[in-house]
Image (cartoon, rainbow, N blue to C red):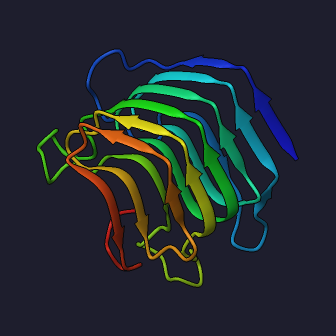
């Protein structure tokens, strides 16, 4: 069990730059040993080149009431999440994405509950039973506000999504990306 509450995290990216592995909060479990009961709440996370919060192999995680601004790729990115809740977060400006900031070809996400599509579904199972509720996602201008690739039991409810190229995208597990 891990709880992070009320922490301010300011990264090195003050400009529109995608920088792999530059995350405000990173947590990585294993397919055989998930991170369990991770709670990240009431945090202010900004200016990171990849993600505000990036979690891989997460069970029973809660991400709530955080403000995430000016990240290069994703606000909240969960890979292989199980029974998680993403609630009441405010995510503003995920740009330029993994490409050169070109609309429709530079992947970026406000909130994504997905899987790593470069691995098999056994090594990286799709996210399952993830509630994404009452979040505000703004200015993901090159890609998607809300996303899942092959998720099972993913609920998007009560969210406000503004100024995103695609408000919400739900595709099969082999949809590419991670």
Q: Is residue 132 above or below residue 20?
A: below
Q: Is residue 93 left or right of residue 103?
A: right
Q: Is residue 34 above or below residue 8?
A: below
What is the x, y in percent for residue 16?
26, 25
Foreground residue, 19 or 109?
109
What is the x, y in percent for residue 172?
37, 79
What is the x, y in percent for residue 150?
45, 76
Is residue 165 visible in the rendered structure shown here? yes
The residue drawn where x is 73% and y is 52% is: 61
Foreground residue, 26 or 109?
109
Outermost residue on the right side: it is: 1
Q: Is residue 153 left or right of residue 172?
A: right
What is the x, y in percent for residue 157?
51, 55
Total marks shown come to 0
Outermost residue on the front side: it is: 158
Q: Quadrant of residue 149?
A: bottom left
The residue drawn where x is 32% and y is 74% is: 175
Give the position of the C terminus as an image quadrant.
bottom left
The residue drawn where x is 54% and y is 63% is: 155
Q: Is residue 16 left or right of residue 92?
A: left
The residue drawn where x is 20% and y is 44% is: 142
């Amino acid at each position: 069990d891990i709880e992070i509450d009320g922490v301010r995290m300011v990264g090195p990216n003050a400009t529109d730059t995608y920088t792999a592995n530059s995350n405000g909060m990173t947590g990585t479990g294993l397919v055989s040993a998930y991170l369990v009961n991770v709670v990240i709440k009431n945090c202010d996370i900004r200016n990171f080149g990849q993600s505000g919060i990036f979690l891989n192999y997460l069970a029973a995680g809660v991400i709530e009431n955080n403000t995430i601004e000016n990240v290069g790729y994703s606000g909240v990115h969960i890979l292989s999440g199980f029974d998680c809740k993403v609630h009441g977060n405010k995510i503003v400006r995920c740009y330029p994405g993994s490409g050169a900031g070109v609309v429709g070809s530079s992947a970026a996400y406000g909130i994504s509950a997905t899987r790593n599509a470069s691995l098999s579904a056994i090594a990286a199972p799709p996210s399952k039973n993830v509630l994404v509720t009452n979040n505000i996602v703004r200015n993901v201008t090159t890609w998607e506000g809300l996303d899942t690739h092959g998720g099972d039991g993913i609920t998007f409810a009560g969210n406000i999504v503004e100024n995103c190229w695609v408000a919400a995208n739900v595709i099969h597990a082999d949809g590419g990306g991670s």
